[in-house]
Image (cartoon, rainbow, N blue to C red):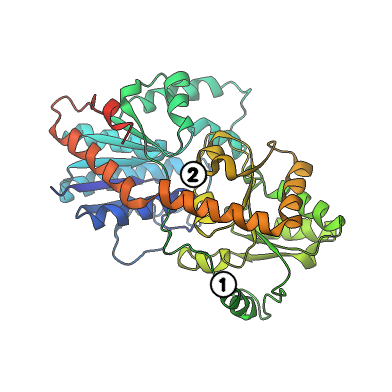
Amino acid sequence: MSYRILMVAPTSFFGDYGCHVRILEETLALQKLGHAVRIVTYPRGRDLPNLDIERTMSIPWRVNYEVGSSRHKVGLDIFLTSRVLRAARRFKPDIIHGHLHEGVLIGWLAAKTFRKPLVFDFQGSLTGEMVDHRFLDPHGRIYKPLRKFEEWIDNLPSCIFTSAAHQAHLLETEYHVPAHKVLHIPDAVNPDWFRPWDDQERAEFRAQKFRLKSETLGIPLERPVVVYLGLLADYQGVGHLLEAANRVLEHGHDVHFLVMGYPGAEKYITRAREMGIGERVEFPGRIPYQDIAQWLAVGDIAVAPKLSQTEGNGKILNYMATGLPVVAFEHPVARDYLGEDGVYAPPGDSEALASCIEMLLLDRAAAKARGKRLRERAIEKFSWDATARKIEQVYMALSSAKTRTVPELEKQRSL
């Protein structure tokens, strides 16, 4: 049976990062199974082929909205609520699928109005993200009320999908969500698209013109490259990465760092120059999703220095499928993905991060073997086909449940 799925995405989809990739790949996998998906989202973002995207109008005072927490999201979410209700009336969905906390709150209103089941794609704590973005003071007066509000939202849907296994424990213990409502639906990756490249392919790309500059990458093939891909922000650990790069280069390693992403590249470019490492750290800017596989294939080592303890970290799966050994700050999400083959540093410890990178540089053969095992792990455990089928089973259970609850999820945990 095929389903009509209305996805609520309170973000500027598509933006080549994080949760956008999950929304995209999830949608494509569900469409492959024969389901119809409509994504309702903010006005900005890039349209993609073969996706049914419906956008809200812009707010006049905030046309150029950037990613992250902002008081202007309130205005965007008001418009998004109106658009979601209109879309639900026309599209006649079988399922409302909310992404992020604002998405499930708006989706709940649509689900109540049209008597449809609601699922929540949980990718991290709302208040945790606001603290990470320095939009909320964890010691301020409104922190506790917002945590209670978040708990209320978390208990609205019939089912919650978590992108990382430890998030289920977080929801059950800190937000008091019944265990039978929570199902681990991990991020996944397409290993045919993200793959290891041979030396000739790598050399050809390094010789190509830089997308944002006139010169070539200019990195000799024999020089190892450490790659990072993601948002450029302090909570993502980019500052710690630059400090680690400085230590690695001070120790005499012939290595290059490729730091890919947006926004705010200029701040980190300036910091790298002030450190005296600007010649060995490249910032190519925002990389379109369709080009990510090629850029990652330039690398020999990947880093995931994200500091957040609750958010997903899907870029790690792209690293793994590309066959790269991965250095990460140790937290449950990284452990979920990398297992015993990850190389871990204590969160926020730039010196330890540098030591981990150096360990892989000093034993290239062992590093390649580690990357090969990580690719095998990605193929075995993180397939989009398997992920979409788990989601489909939840849709089926919800559509047939008069009470809009899914006690069967306890059985599905082991699937």
Between the C-alphas of marks 2 and 1, the distance is 46 Å
Say whether disc 2 or disc 1 marks the residue closer to the N-terminus: 2
> On the rendered image, what quadrant is the C terminus found in?
top left
Q: Contact (CB < 8 A) between labels 2 and 1?
A: no
Tell me the crowding category of disc 1: few under 14, some 14 to 19, or many 20 or more residues within 10 angstroms, Cα based: few
| Residue 134 vertical placement versus 181 (above, below) | below
| Residue 193 vertical placement versus 20 (above, below) | below
Q: Is residue 228 visible?
A: no
Dot 1 amino acid type: Asp
Q: Secondary structure at mark 2?
A: loop
Q: Residue at x 76, y 50 (%)?
A: 244
Asked if residue 117 lies left or right of residue 325, the reply is left
Dot 2 amino acid type: His
Residue 225 placement (x, y as % from top left) = 69, 64
Residue 159 placement (x, y as % from top left) = 30, 31
Tell me the crowding category of disc 2: few under 14, some 14 to 19, or many 20 or more residues within 10 angstroms, Cα based: few
| Residue 133 vertical placement versus 258 (above, below) | above
Q: Residue at x 42, y 21 (%)?
A: 172
Q: Is residue 39 visible?
A: yes
Q: Residue at x 21, y 41 (%)?
A: 95
The image quarter containing residue 206 is: bottom right
Residue 20 placement (x, y as % from top left) = 43, 52
Q: Secondary structure at mark 1?
A: loop
Asked if residue 249 lies left or right of residue 411, the reply is right
Residue denoted by label 2: 72
Res. 240 mark: none
* Nearer mark to the viewer, of 2 and 1: 1
Residue 27 placement (x, y as % from top left) = 31, 53
Residue denoted by label 1: 198
